[in-house]
Amino acid sequence: MNQQQLDIREQQKTSWDKFSPGWKKWDDFTMRFLKPMGDEIIAMLKLQPSDQVLDIATGTGEPGLTIASIVNKGKVTGTDLSPEMARLATDNAKTKGLNNYTAIAADACELPFDDNTFDAISCRMGFMFFPDMALAAKEMYRVLKPGGRMATSVWGGPEKNEWITVMMSTMKKHIDVPAPPPAAPGMFRCAAPGLITGLLKDAGFDNMEEKKIENRVEYNSPDHYWIMMNEVAAPVVAAMSQADHDTKTKIKNDLFQLLEEKKDKGALSLPFAAIIIYGEK
């Protein structure tokens, strides 16, 4: 990796270590939200009880923890760039009594494993954070056994992910929220049709498959949405850090008015869309 990519890696590590307490607090909610993507990844991988599985960008543990309960004669290794997130995943595995799950801090672009180690790889919403996505894809290919399977998920376009864009668009009315550079981590960095499939093909993967998922995420109230977004959504926290108290109040008021308009029969639910990509070595 070049110096810019190394700097991005350090920024990502620092950021996720910082946000780990918020992810611990909101773990139940966020794991329910992300479950459809994890379920589709698991279905595509066609796991066997004795599989050795790598869960990259494991975060607080999912979908690796669910996979560990399936491969009960095998093992799951979770990796995350953030040591604090890996620690949370380890704690969650202990709570669930999963002795065949281990989490370590590791960079997806420099995986600390031998060639041909794993039967399957899962990576839910990880690619958008990798400093060098092509290098990460090559590393995944390298550590997979011949015939191994890999499945990942990325967010679809902003027009179908109102759960985040409603917040970002409201903030942009009051503060400057510059778009990330093309090579930098970003929520919709991987949304272009065929982008990740192309990277995986270039890395050597074959028998590719893509599937789209669209659903809705429900919030208890506008206040629930506001608090959570300000505690776990890195782009929101970064942008809001430059706003003074009065500006934050204006953003909140505008957002709440918009969210009230989007309620359906008293319930607040916002759409999301993701792409699931599968390949084989």
Image (tube, grey):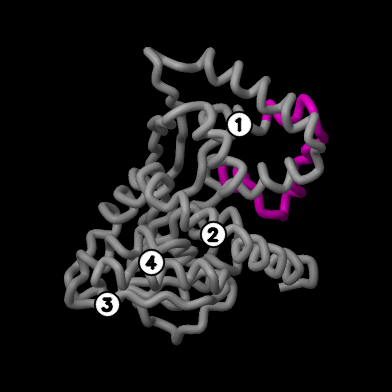
Depth check: 138 or 164 in front? 164
User: Decide: marks 1, 4 in contact (CB < 8 A)?
Assistant: no
Residue 191 among magenta residues: yes
Counting from the top left corner in percent of width and height, residue 63 is at: 35, 58
Q: Could you tell whether 237 is left or right of 276 in the image?
A: right
- Choose mark 1 or mark 4, whichever is in front: 1
Counting from the top left corner in percent of width and height, residue 199 is at: 55, 57
- Choose mark 2 or mark 4, whichever is in front: 2
The residue sitting at the front extreme is: 245
Q: What amino acid does circle 1 point to?
A: Thr
Please, what secondary structure does the residue beneath circle 3 have? loop
Magenta stretch bounds: 169-192
Q: Which residue is mark 1?
A: 165
Q: Which residue is mark 3?
A: 100
What is the crowding at mark 3: few (fewer than 14 residues within 10 Å), some, or many (at least 20)? Answer: some
Q: What amino acid does circle 4 point to?
A: Ile
User: Decide: marks 2, 4 in contact (CB < 8 A)?
Assistant: no
* Residue 101 appears in the picture as rendered: yes
